[in-house]
Image (cartoon, rainbow, N blue to C red):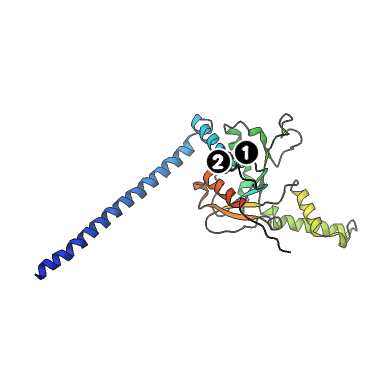
Amino acid sequence: MQSSKMNELATPNLMASTLWLLLHTVVTWMEHLWWLLRRCRKALHHILPFGTAIESYRLKQSQQYVKAQLQMVSKVPTHLVVLLGPEQPDYQRLSQFIYWSYAAGIAYVSFYDHNGTIKRNHEQIKRCVGDAPLEDKNHICWSDQNHDTAAVDKTTSDRKRTLVSFLSPEDGKQGLVSLSRSIGESVRRRDLFPSDVSIELLDSRLQASSGYVPDPDLALYFGEVCSTYGLLPWQIRLTEFLQLEWRLADSNEHHFVDCLLRFAKCEQRLGT
C-alpha cells in the first residue's frame, strides 16, 4: 500500500523533471541559434562593401523606414549628438546615424567621445559616407568645410541638408576656459566692460566659435550608464539624454526611430 503511494508521488515528479529538462534544452538551443544568427549578420555586415546591391537596398530601406515612421511626428530634434562612452568607435555603424538623421529631417548631427578618437579619425566617417550608395550624399555637409561655396551645390542649396560635426573634450570645458580668458583680456584692455558680460554674451560667443550650430536638444547614449563624459557642459542645459541600445553594434534604425518618438513626447518645463 505504501509502495503504491510512493510510485504515485514519483510519477508527477518524473514528468515535471522531464518537462523541465526538455524546456531547458529548447531554450539553450534557441540561445545558440540566436547567437549564431547575430554572428552571421555581423560577418555579412563587414564582408559586404557599401557598393553592393544588397547593401544599397538595405540602406535605402532603412531611410524609407525612418521617413515613414516619422511622417506624422511634428517634433524632431534640430541638433542630435551621438555619444560614445567606453566602447570603441565603429565608423561604418556611426555613419548610419547620418543617413537616418537626414531621412528624419535633422539638420545637425554631432559625434562625441571623451577620448577625442572620433574627431581625430573623422575622415573615416567621411569615407564611409562617400562610399555609400545614396542619392542624397551631396546634401550631407561637414563642419570643417566652407558651406557657402563648395560644400553645398548651388542647385540644391535650397533643399534640406544635414551638417555633421565632430566633438571632443577640448570643445567643452577647454572651450569655456578659452572663452573666459578671451573675455577677461577684453575687459582688461577695456574693449569690453564688466557690465557687458552676460549669459547672452557667452551664448553668442560660443555660438560663433561653433559655427553657429544650435545647442543639442537630443543626445543618444549606449549602455545602462547615462553620463555626459564631459560633453559641452554649457550647451546641454536643455538636452534630453535617451538610451539607444546596450551597444553600438546592436543599434539599428528601429531603435533610432523609437528614440525620436520618445523625444517627440518629452515636455520641457523650465519653471517660472
Is 4 rendered above or below residue 244?
below
Res. 215 in view:
yes
Three-letter amino acid code of the residue under disc 1: Lys
Q: Quadrant of the N terminus?
A: bottom left
Q: Quadrant of the C terminus?
A: bottom right
Residue depicted at x 20% and y 61%: 12
Is 243 rendered above or below residue 5?
above
**Which one is nearer the viewer's eye here, 98 or 14?**
14
Would residue 222 be found to the left or right of residue 23 on screen? right
Element type at mark 1 = helix
Residue farthest to the front, as pictured: 72
Would residue 245 be found to the left or right of residue 39 on screen? right
Q: Quadrant of residue 139?
A: top right
Three-letter amino acid code of the residue under disc 2: Gln
Res. 252 in view:
no
Q: Are marks 2 and 1 in contact (CB under 8 Å)?
A: no
The percent position of residue 48, horizontal first and vertical second, equals 48, 34
Residue farthest to the bottom, as pictured: 2
Element type at mark 2 = helix
Residue that mark 2 sits on:
92
| Mark 1: few/some/many CA within 10 Å (<14, 14-19, 20+) | some
Say which mark, if any, is on residue 126: 1
